[in-house]
Every structure is written in C-alpha cells, then in structure tokens.
Image: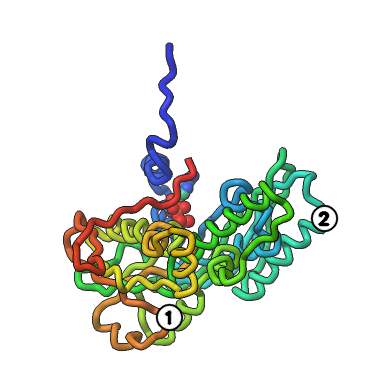
Amino acid sequence: MEQKRTEIAQLGEFGLIDRISSKFPLQQPSSLKGIGDDAAVIDAGEDVLLLSTDMLIEGIHFDLSYMPLQHLGYKAVAVNVSDIAAMNGKPEQIVIGLAISNRFSVEAVDALYAGIKAACDNYKVDLVGGDTTASPSGLVISISVLGRTKKGNEVYRSGAQDKDIICVTGDLGGAYIGLQILEREKAVYLTNPEMQPELDNHEYAVGRQLKPEARMDIIYELADLNIKPTAMIDVSDGLASELFHISKSSGVGVRIFEDKIPIDENAYNTAVEFNLDPFTCALNGGEDYELLFTIKQSDFEKIKNHSDIHFIGYVHPDAKQNVMITKGENVVPLKAQGWEHF
Ligand code: ADP
Ligand code: MG
C-alpha cells in the first residue's frame, strides 16, 4: 500500500504546530496554558511559572562567517528571555542543549559561553543545567528558560479587547535589514576574498541582527507604572505576523497606521540604499525582539510620553479585519509572511 506523504511546507510552521497541539489535550491541572503563547504557564501557588524553549541552528538561524560566537551565545539567551518578557514575567533559570562538531575548539566553546554568561549576568538568569552531544557538522544551541510572575500578572496573546491601544517598543525592521547587509557582504567576500566588508554607516542595523536585547526594561517600567497590558507578544517573526497572532488568539481585529510604525532613521537609510522598502522590512522582517502589546485606553495617559513606546493603532471587534492605513490614507489588508524555513 502506498504511504501518504504530505510536505511540511504545505502546512507551514504554524499549521504544523496546530496539528501537534490538537493531539495533546492538557492532563495536569497545573498546566494553566499549553501550546499557543510565548511561554507555557504553570501553576505554582501564589505564582505562575513560565516555560519556553528556542533553538538556534547553524545554517538556518545563524551563519558563523559573520556571527561571532560570543554574540551568538548572547542572542540565544536573549531570544528566550524575550518570550518570558512577552508573558510579563521575569526570567530566572535556563538550561542549554548543545550539539557541537569537532570543527569547533575548546576556545570556540569558551567564546560561545562568554556570550551566554554576559546575557545571564545582564538578565540575572542562572544557568542550571543542559546537555552536550556531538553533532555531525553544525552547531545547534537549544535553550529552555523558566520564568515567574505573580498569578494573575501573566499576560497572554488572547486578552486584547475592543478599543485597546496597540503599542510597540523600540524600532522595527533593523534586524532584517542588518541580515541583508551581512548576507551581501558575505557574497562579495566569497567571490573576492580581498574585499573588506563595508559595514560603515550600517552599524545600527547590523547590531540589531547580531546583538538583540530582550526588553525586560519595559516589563519593569510597566510594572512601576502599574500597567498590565491586556495582550502581549514579542516580535520575533515580524510585526504583521505577531498582530495576526494577537488577532487570532483574542478574537479581535487590528487597525494600524503605517506612519506610526517605528523605524530607526539609520536603518531606514540603509534599507533604501539596499533597495528594500523599510516598511516591508518592519512588517515582515523579524528578529527585532521588541514587545508588541495592547493597553486599555485608561492606561494611555501614564505612558503617552514614553520615548521608547510607540502607539501604532487600535483594536476593533471584527477579527476578520486586520488592516493598515497607509500614508496615502488607503486601507489595505495586513499580510503576514513571517519566517518560512521549510
Ligand atoms: P515563539 O515565536 O514565541 O517562540 P513559536 O511560534 O515558536 O513561539 O511557537 C508557538 C507555540 O507553539 C508555543 O506555545 C510553542 O511552545 C509551541 N510549539 C512550537 N513548536 C512546537 C513543537 N514542535 N511541539 C510542541 N509545541 C510547539
Ligand atoms: Mg515569542
């Protein structure tokens, strides 16, 4: 009998996750939230524990010809911490799974862990375990993070409500623009090794790709201001894709304004120089690790003057209408491309 074979690309990453998720109804009363948010939420008495994992694979997520190992180590921790931030929690512990080939020296591992250590110190996270194994050629780093917050203080993707204000931190698109520059310089180098990389004037975008930070600073500031976002997610796949996650989970629609999307001036100029549309980079790039969240209108006054929080639109009741109002005042449907590795 012929076996049925479906390509993973037919389902896509999210289709595949939905398919897995449907087969695993939760069995433990302590599993408050399973698959479907930035981290799982686990009952721990007065608190909830937040559990999330992220894997970085050589050749898919990073290229060691331009990613220094120290930065890679830092980034691997930061992207995990970012998922805890997105739940409105504080990270506490990580464990690291490392698969490494004999292509790498002890000094290379030292460099990787120097970056991991810097991130652990910065985010006050303890490295408490892991696993080490040989790999046929490439490097794989898989990190799981455990975070915590008071029960009821956690923020899901699902809490956005009609008339909430949509906020995003920092600026968007830079990490994707930085990646394009690094890829171009690599191609130039491969055809002509005499050429030195031209990264001058592009440091900002390149830095956004190589040295992302999790926005724990924003989580602490929101707590100080006594603001609990109604919904939150981190921007790992691109603004449009994350807006769709909030829309789908919350059962609401979003309207955003193109001219409110924050783009760093330097990154903007770099994009134009590379014939990239900076707004497309912001909407569909990824890896910016900023926070996208919604707040009640009554909280707006408290943060309206915050220099690093931008108000890009609002929530409305129709989940099927996710739109952007362009600079020319046209209303266009949002499109989520996200990252497709398959
Ligand atoms: P994020 O971008 O925030 O890391 P993902 O898009 O990777 O989130 O994952 C979305 C949800 O699906 C999360 O709850 C995650 O734990 C879950 N998930 C992803 N891959 C798998 C898998 N292979 N098996 C089970 N759950 C998964
Ligand atoms: Mg996330």
Where is residue 177 shown, x and y percent of the image?
Answer: 49, 61
Residue 225: x percent and y percent?
39, 86
Residue ID at (46%, 70%): 269
**Residue 264 or 85: which is nearer the viewer?**
264
Relative height, residue 266 to residue 332 (above, below): below
- Note whether 307 is above or below 155 in the view shown: below
Gap between marks 2 and 1, in whole Å? 40 Å
Quarter of the figure with residue 324: bottom left
* Mark 2: secondary structure: helix
Residue 40 lies, with reference to residue 3, above or below; the image says below
Image coordinates of residue 37 in percent, x first then y, are 40, 58
Residue that numbered label 1 is attached to: 308
The residue at 65%/70% (across/down) is 120
Q: Is residue 63 left or right of residue 110?
A: left
Looking at the image, can residue 157 be seen? yes
Residue annotated with mark 2:
106
